Image (spheres, coloured by chain):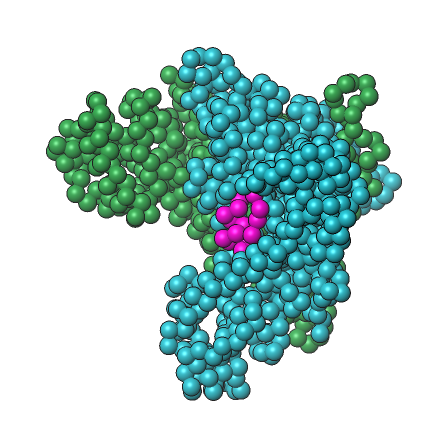
Chain colours: A green, B cyan
């Protein structure tokens, strides 16, 4: 069977690629490091995007759209930000092709159409947006500005992986402007909470909320807050970040406002983003060796109904019943598909929808109908139940909720079992190598030590949890005093 | 008053720019030819996008996402398409910046990071998509493919205008693949009808459905269908196109399928798109010298409520009543805002929401409340009515429907009055110069004649209407025989 996938145990990385390709979420493209998001994957992204978009709007944000291009002179204005992204920029230098005189039917870049100033394709939009905000902000009455953008961005990564790390990706980036430091900090944390809420309650992926060490901070930020998730192979994945930018961009682009006392002050900033990378997290957190397992709240299809019949007469009776059930399910807002394509056998369909992670499958046969029952299979546990057809829509509706909750609980149990304290260097290395997950260890607070630990173990500080308990101890590497444990892990 | 705008009579073009800027739909950006879509303009685009997206899905289409970049070798594969867009391409040649050794703190393109093959930023996605379809289509069972993409595209235009012609713009592009010519032709016309339905019933802009002459055809198409709208200055605007691409792209990218008889055939294609340009059409079709006039079905705000009061006691009574009304309006699905910002006077607010084209304004004063009435102003006719508060939500709801219909009727009357037959060259020129609009004239069917007419008058053939009557006549320029009139106009 062509759709077989590599098992997690055999090759975790290949298992992941198989899921993305055979689950029809995405495909490779002809462009180095860029992928095609296939219709099934894009429907998943649309559900995620719509849920997030509503959360942003409910917290007072509006959407806008800024240019794809950043002129080089603006790009370099905030030096740390520029330095952080300079090595992975796609750069437009020309604006016209012409016929290649030495190669009939081929085109070449027209050397006469060279741009005076090169254009960087946005790797993130702080520069172009803060240059725009300069014209929009004069007084405290213009603040806060609470703007979000859904866009494509480009970061020229050398090693790419479907969804997890691609040269072009889709994301949202919020860029807010505030009159006070306190308000900007509050916004930073508010959006971190929105991300955590989304990850846990929609994606069923438990996350740890924390703050990054200086080494892992966004280029140009004063502080980077993050949500960190754990994958089934014990590696961590940064699922979203929210940055407190201080007045760095306001100073770089000279954005001042007159306050109530008519004094000119620099504006305070935040930015925050999540991307199609979340789909990678979703896949790796939940799926199994048979395919994807998608949480009901964002699954493109929540229920698939497969008829089992011989001949047109049986089919007609089943069709009628399925129409009734579908109607009820749709009325309850459930995304349902009746797959009565007779090119494929039921067994093929079962495997196909297992591969695609559809949460609930109903199989209806002629004999079932005589008994007024239906077979229901849930994707997460693979349990099958025979259920009476009376009130089946309600049954399915609560089953979807149960699956959503069960997926979260399962992932949370796994995550909680994989936060382990280490009290010696040996223990630290052994945990990373043998158990994986987050290792809670003392750290002396310096970038040098973090760098040294990374070189020895490939583990980085994923975050200092927001609800961290203070505890005196000594650094796992240097033995210097430390006042709290931080979470280390190897990460995607 | 800073928000005053140029009148249409004084300077139509400046009037348009004033509306876009002062109506806060968009702003200029630091990037040549690119604009910023401001939150109010983007909310309008979101409403348009969501309505169109639903229509696409209701007609069986799904969304996907393809790369921003097209490698040059793919770009040039379909020669006519490549030729049509070669002169307006933004080209990525490098993938890294480095510190400029001669200019401290500045960056420069790293000459060592030159791409082996240049990447074109998509001006349209046929090439990258058909290159992808090659891997997705093997058998007739894989057809039809009915895929749409919402994306940004870049066309390096020399003369740009906000919304109407910008270097980067947002659009959707449908790309479908079919087993037969008939099916592809049917799809082309189906999507043209979807566009016409959207333009007329959502944007309240009447359109003529037709087919383009060879001169105005999309590069790479066999036939281009279009909807043409008329602006208040008598110029036409192409509002959407749907292309029958024949087997051109299938041949360029070698996309074949085995049919039911196991014979290999090239696939048939269509593509169709509308863009943020529609916002320009909307603005120019309806607005007046006081500002925007937005059709209720897509207006970001449908109703604004302005309180008129002295002192907190009056305000409290009004607030309570407005809360009731707002609740009722929201329950009816109406987008309503209560503007009780006390930094601005009611007169300022009236002008502001007139500028922004909000369809209905309610002004509620303390005295009105005593009489149990409210003053309602409609933006399209500027009529004011005093209406009893009992059942005001229902009143507003039907008023919104009436405004939608009235805007369409008004635009249609204007359009119908501006389709004029011309039977001599003198009459033809005079109509174009003095009356404007569409001029229905005989044409000998040759590209040369169309080109000559364009050079003499700046008018082009906007379309040959789908429902055209056959009528023998002689070409307006050459006198050669013609079998039907076609529609000429000067156009955006």
- Which residue is farthest top? B262
Up the image or down, B459 lies above or below A161; here it is below
Residue at horizontal 71%, vertical 63%?
B8
Up the image or down, B42 lies above or below A357; here it is below
- Can you give x and y, in whole percent of width and height, for residue B222 in the image? 61, 28
- Residue B368 forms part of the magenta stretch: no
* Number of numbered callouts drawn: 0
Seen from the viewer's position, the closer of residues A346 and A492 is A346
Seen from the viewer's position, the closer of residues B98 and A47 is A47
**Residue B386 showing in the rendered view:** yes
- Can you give x and y, in whole percent of width and height, for residue B310 in the image? 53, 87
Residue at horizontal 56%, vertical 52%?
B206
Q: Magenta span covers which residues?
A: B195-210
Up the image or down, B457 lies above or below B81; here it is below
Residue at horizontal 76%, vertical 45%?
B425
Seen from the viewer's position, the closer of residues A65 and A224 is A65
Residue at horizontal 44%, vertical 31%?
A233
């Amino acid at each position: 069977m062509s759709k077989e996938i590599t098992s997690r145990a055999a090759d975790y990385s290949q298992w992941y690629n198989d899921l993305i390709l055979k689950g029809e979420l995405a495909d490779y493209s002809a462009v180095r490091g860029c992928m095609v998001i296939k219709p099934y994957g894009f429907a998943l992204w649309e559900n995620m995007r719509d849920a997030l978009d509503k959360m942003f709007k409910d917290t007072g944000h509006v959407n806008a759209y800024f240019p794809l291009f950043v002129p080089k002179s603006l790009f370099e204005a905030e030096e740390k930000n520029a330095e952080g992204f300079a090595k992975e920029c796609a750069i437009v230098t020309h604006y016209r092709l012409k016929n290649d005189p030495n190669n009939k039917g081929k085109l070449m870049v027209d050397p006469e159409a060279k741009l005076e100033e090169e254009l960087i394709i946005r790797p993130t939009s702080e520069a172009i947006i803060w240059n725009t905000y300069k014209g929009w902000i004069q007084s405290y009455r213009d603040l806060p500005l609470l703007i979000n953008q859904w866009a494509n961005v480009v970061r020229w990564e050398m090693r790419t992986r479907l969804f997890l790390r691609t040269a072009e990706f889709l994301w949202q980036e919020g860029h807010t402007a505030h009159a006070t430091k306190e308000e900007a900090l509050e916004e930073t944390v508010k959006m971190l909470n929105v991300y955590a809420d989304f990850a846990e309650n929609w994606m069923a992926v438990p996350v740890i909320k924390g703050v990054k060490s200086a080494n892992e901070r966004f280029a140009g930020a004063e502080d980077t807050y993050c949500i960190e998730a754990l994958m089934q192979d014990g590696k961590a994945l940064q699922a979203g970040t929210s940055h407190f930018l201080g007045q760095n961009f306001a100073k770089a682009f000279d954005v001042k406002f007159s306050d109530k006392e008519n004094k000119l002050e620099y504006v305070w900033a935040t930015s925050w983003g999540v991307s199609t990378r979340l789909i990678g997290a979703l896949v790796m957190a939940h799926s199994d060796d048979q395919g994807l397992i998608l949480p009901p709240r964002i699954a493109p299809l929540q229920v698939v109904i497969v008829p089992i019949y011989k001949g047109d007469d049986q089919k007609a009776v089943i069709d009628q019943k399925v129409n009734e059930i579908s109607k009820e399910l749709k009325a309850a807002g459930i995304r349902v598909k009746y797959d009565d394509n007779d090119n494929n056998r039921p067994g093929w369909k079962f495997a196909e929808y297992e591969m695609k992670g559809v949460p609930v499958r109903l199989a209806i046969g002629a004999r079932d109908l005589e008994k007024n029952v239906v077979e229901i299979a849930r994707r997460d546990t693979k349990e099958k139940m025979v259920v009476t057809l009376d009130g089946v829509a309600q049954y399915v509706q609560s089953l979807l909720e149960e699956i959503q909750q069960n997926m979260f609980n399962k992932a949370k149990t796994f995550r909680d079992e994989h936060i382990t304290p280490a009290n010696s260097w040996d223990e630290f290395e052994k945990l990373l190598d043998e158990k994986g997950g987050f290792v809670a260890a003392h750290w002396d607070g310096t970038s040098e030590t973090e760098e040294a630990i990374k070189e020895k173990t490939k583990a980085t500080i994923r975050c200092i949890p927001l609800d961290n308990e203070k505890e005196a101890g000594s650094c796992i590497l240097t033995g210097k005093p430390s006042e709290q444990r931080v979470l280390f892990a190897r990460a995607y």
